[in-house]
Image (tube, helix red, strand yellow):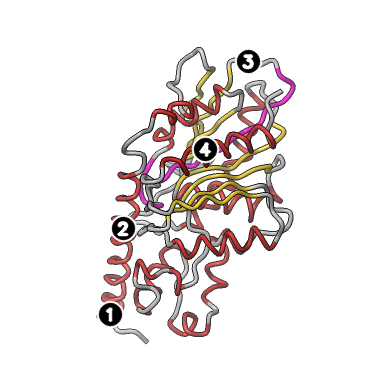
Amino acid sequence: MKTRAEKKARRAGVGLYILAFVLAFGAGVISKFAIQPAWAKEYSATWSDEIGTLQADLAYGEGEANKFDLYLPKDSSKGSYGLVAYLHAGGFTSGDKADDKDTLAWLCSKGYVAAGINYTLRTDTNTASVLSQSNEIKAAIPKVVEAAESAGYHIDKLTMAGGSAGHALAMIYAYRDAKDAPVPVVLTYGAVGPSSFYREDWGIFGADVSDEAAIGLFSVMSGTEISADELHDGSYLEKMKPIAAAEWVTPDAPPTVVAYGTHDRMQPFLASLRLKTALTENGVDFQYFEFPHSGHGLQNDNAVSKQWMEAIEEYLEKYMPVD
């Protein structure tokens, strides 16, 4: 049995890895799109009544963070609409649905119903994890569809999207939970979201060489305690699977557009290659964009960034056409 001192040291150690995780992902959020190229204006919009109607802070659960914003297009006469759920970044510890208002407004201006969804963020005083956050998103989607239907917008298809932490949660839903979705999930897109958790890939946090680092980081993210024995015999991967989107890719997975920076110091690039392999081996229609000079913010490859956004628009038009 562990002594009180050992337990205290253990909690302190885990706290250090939470702090490292928060600081790393926070830096990525700060740097993301710090400089906007001229073409990027084509993929954002300033919200106004000319675009549609915004229903803010609708509840999908009892938690304080269980709220979503619903962006409804001006034209409400169509027989059906595609829904894009865009999940915010923030390293699972910060961020808000309002951070993506210009992206959500752009989606709505194109004729989609769009939704920004909040989820309970990890803090040093709660036990929120990527797993609990993914389950909140799973609970939210039927409520989002229901709210759109109540407003007179019949939803017949769904795209899951997001950035960084939000991208990870979007992929988890698209690959793990699509079978339970109220409408077909026809597309997922986003950038720099972690999708697998092999310790050898996570050298940016020292998890490849330090048992303590791997146990602390993966226990926090998965929401379950991982032991040294599980780490050594590889069985920890079963505990990581519920939040490892790449492990849920099948031939039935929705078309996918993703982007990753080769110099990412927040989400390891090596992990993204496992996602690429899974998509390839399962014959999924996907486009994978590699940013050879960029980190988590994808800030140093303007030409590739433009190609990525063009691919997103192309896939939206192909799999969620606005009639």
Residue positioned 32% across, 36% down in the render: 35
Label 2, residues with CA under 10 Å away: few <14, some 14-19, many ≥20:
few
Q: Which residue is mark 1?
A: 4
> How far is disc 3 from disc 2 in space, using C-alphas?
45 Å
Q: Which residue is mark 2?
A: 124
Q: What secondary structure prevails in the magenta region?
A: loop
User: Which mark is on residue 75?
Assistant: 3
> How far is disc 4 from disc 2 in space, using C-alphas?
36 Å
Return the disc, 4 or 1, that comes first in the chain's sequence.
1
Q: Amino acid at mark 3?
A: Asp
Nearer to us of marks 2 and 1 is 2
The x and y percentages for residue 19 are 28, 60
Q: Amino acid at mark 1?
A: Arg
Q: Amino acid at mark 2?
A: Asp
> How far is disc 4 from disc 1 in space, using C-alphas?
52 Å
The x and y percentages for residue 102 are 44, 28
> Quick one: SS at disc 1?
helix
148 or 24: nearer the eye? 24
